[in-house]
Amino acid sequence: MLPPGCTRSDVERLLPVLRRAFRLSEACAFTLLAFIQATRPSDWTDPARDPVCHAMQTAMAQRLGLTPRALRYHEVTLERAGLLLKTTAADGSRGSFAGGTVVQGLSLAPLVERMPELLALAAEDEAERQRLLGLRRQCSAARRVLKGVLQRLLESAPQAPATTECLAFYAELPRRYDGLEASDLDALLSSLDEAVDKGLGLLEMRPESSGVPEPGFRLSVQATREDNLESCVASADGTRPAGTPADASLVAAPVGAEEGREPQARDFQRGHKPHWLETFTPRRLYAACSEDMRMYLDATKGHRALPNELDLVRAAVMILPDLGINPSAWDEATEAMGDLAAALAVIVIDARRFDPVRPIRSPGGALRSFARLALAGRLNLAGSLIGLVERNRREPE
């Protein structure tokens, strides 16, 4: 009998895992699938019965488009692999005789016995797949952060050796990560981290700004008309209930787009011309984060006292599973507002889960809502961050 909760269809879904584990050919694995499908589904979950394929060899060979000899070869291969037991009579007959006391055919009881092992292998494969996806996502995010750093370096210090070095490194980066193993992705991510560190270090060596906001930049809520207000406060499904008044810290504002900037994220907030981390310092952002987010930031920043731009992005990517946010929601957010702004949105959403008045119960829905508002030019992420930072400043230590 299969483990509790498993059915014949679960065995069928494990066929790719089984094929890799036992090094079966594609034709042999397809033959095994045919044997499985020729059994009764109830026999897989009945402790008193074994799943047995009673189909005649010639009929099964015809169904699979094989010669009887090729089918016999697959049967022997599967039997030697310990996946089935051949119990046919001397003349090759198969079936159930003597009121079911004699059962002849291809018994898949050995496969049933190996199901716990196969389920464990499937879990390992899925964990490795998720790890690879996470590494690829982090490499992609780091590459985009590096591109933004490089653009700022080309504007502020185009002749600096570090700028030339960063440009050369960027030009050599692989365009796709699909063929890279986990060790290759780890090495690539480390080199990207180092390049971003160098670039950000050079940017920090620029003369400090006066600290006076540029004309037209307002830290306060930017919407001035009632019909422009759009709350980002999420209900259980990630959307604002009808009739809910706009939250002052999460209100959206219309924007005017500027040309030649990348990506759309740079354009979704009117007046937000300074870089995000020039307005919201890493120290204040780190202090305003939840304990969970600070744990991930500590992991990404390593020995540095405060997180940099890439640390914020990587920590946001790492916390997505904890928040139940589908990776597609993150991709949607980065396309709409860019990696850093998406990371800051995740920080806001994560912190708002614990809001005593209006908590966000669906982080994934909230992030998708942020992305839609950003595309529509109605997201005031700065206002959300101001509210978060100010709330942390007022809370007793």
Image (tube, helix red, strand yellow):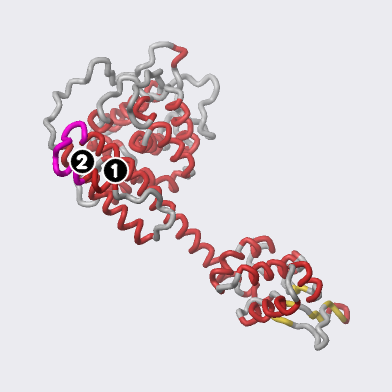
Tell whether position 162 is magenta. yes
Rendering quarter of residue 90: bottom right
Lower sequence index among marks 2 and 1: 2
Q: Residue 320 versus residue 28: which sits nearer the camera?
A: 28
> Which quarter of the picture shows residue 12?
bottom right
Mark 1 secondary-structure assignment: helix
Magenta span includes 315 = no
Query: In the image, residue 33 lies at what x, y percent?
Result: 68, 67
Classed neighbour count for the residue bearing mark 1: other residues with Cα under 10 Å, few (<14), some (14–19), many (≥20): many
Contact check, label 2 and label 1, Cβ < 8 Å: yes
Label 2 sits on what residue type? Answer: Leu
Residue at image x 33%, y 26%? 260
Main SS category, magenta section? helix
Quarter of the picture holding the N terminus: bottom right
Residue 198 versus residue 58 in the image, above or below: above
Indicate the position of residue 85 as horizontal and vertical percent values. Answer: 69, 80
Task: Examine the rendering and report whether any part of residue 351 can be seen.
Answer: no
Residue kind at label 1, given as amino acid type: Leu
What's the residue at 75%, 83% (across, down)?
87
Report how many numbered discs are placed on residues in the image. 2
Q: Which residue is denoted by mark 1 in the rendering?
A: 310
Against 30, is 340 above or below?
A: above
Residue at image point 38% right, 48% down: 175
Residue 205 picture location, percent across and down: 13, 37
Separation of residues labelled 2 and 1 (CA atoms):
10 Å
Q: Residue visible at 34% across and 19% down?
A: 221
Report the span colored magenta: 154-165
Residue 200, numbered label: 2
For numbered disc 2, what is the local secondary structure? helix
**In which quadrant of the rendered image does the C terminus lie?**
top left
